[in-house]
Image (spheres, rainbow, N blue to C red):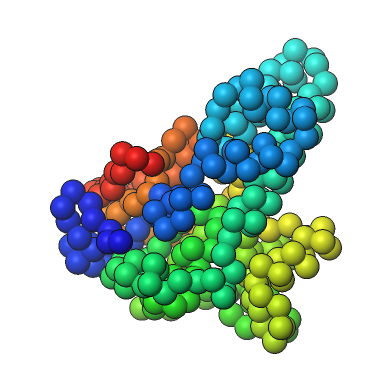
Amino acid sequence: MSIEINNLTVDDFNGLPVLIGNGLSIRINEDYRYDNLVSKIQEKCSDSLYSVMNSLGERNIEKLLLLLESSIHICELCDINPRRIRDLKRELRNEFLSVVHELHPDSHEFNNLIYSGVGDELDNFGDIFTTNYDFTLYYLILKFTSHWDGFGNSKFDDFKVYTKFRHFDQKYIFYLHGNLLLFENGNDTFKITSGNSDYDILEMIDVQVKKDNFPLIVAEGKSESKEMAIKENQYLDLCFHYFTDHKSDELVIFGHSLGESDSHIIDAINSNFAKVFYGLYDKI
């Protein structure tokens, strides 16, 4: 698989920052299509959530969350208790996180033949910004590129803590909406690693979830809610700052639909980048 935009290849974008969405994960693993994620959620969710999802007929997770948020807002305006809708929204968010986790290959299933071509091409780009929650980019960068996520050593064997210090000759990856790998601890954001443990990373995440420590994920429906969640976390806020104030005035976008719930990203693009190369894939 190669990355190509309007007959241009990655060589034409050498050193430019790139914004990557779920399309990249879908190209590598079809299970990440939104309609498949919804089907998996409906297989395990409560009868109430199943009924609501069926009635709405929406197959996009973010749009479903947006509809539930709008319903909560309407209830509040009409002085109606929105507790049950809030519970459904929380369930949908948690089931989404659970399904993405279940669909993930572990490190032993990582297939070099599938990923290596993409990894080599990603290494041509400058900074990588992504809204993806899954490990696809983490695996690619770990194996094939020279990018760094900014997480360094900490006193904990199984975590790496984020540092604000930047080497300006270094290429970075920024998780704009968080990731399954990331967790909060007070004012710090940590990335989970296998460290000195015998566990696989997915198993390490399970250990944290069983302790009621949930990954740092921005899965709100409304763009305004996403922006608020970003500002509440120092790491996410810093990532978004680097995106809105990037030194390049050109940006490549690959595998990202930039829908209604991404208005905060669209505004950042419009205010910071003079030229955008937008990759479209009509089957996503």
Q: Residue furthest top?
A: 78
Please state the total of marks drawn on the protein image.
Answer: 0
Q: Is residue 142 left or right of residue 145?
A: right
Any part of residue 78 in sight: yes
**Looking at the picture, does residue 87 appear above or below residue 75?**
below
Give the percent coordinates (x, y) of residue 242. 45, 60
Give the percent coordinates (x, y) of residue 6. 18, 49
Among the 4 quarters of the image, the one containing residue 133: bottom right
Among the 4 quarters of the image, the one containing residue 212: bottom right
Give the percent coordinates (x, y) of residue 156. 73, 81
Viewport quadrant of the C terminus: top left
Viewport quadrant of the N terminus: bottom left
Q: Is residue 72 left or right of residue 10?
A: right
**Looking at the picture, does residue 43 appear above or below residue 27?**
above
**Looking at the picture, does residue 145 appear above or below residue 132?**
below
**Looking at the picture, does residue 90 appear above or below residue 183?**
above
For the point 33% across and 51% down, the residue is: 253
Give the percent coordinates (x, y) of residue 228. 61, 43
Any part of residue 166 in sight: no
Q: In this view, does 264 lie to the left or right of 104?
A: left
Q: Which residue lies furthest to the bottom in this view?
A: 196
For the point 42% across and 74% down, the residue is: 112
For the point 66% across and 75% down, the residue is: 200
Residues 111 and 84: in front is: 111
For the point 81% across and 27% down, the residue is: 84
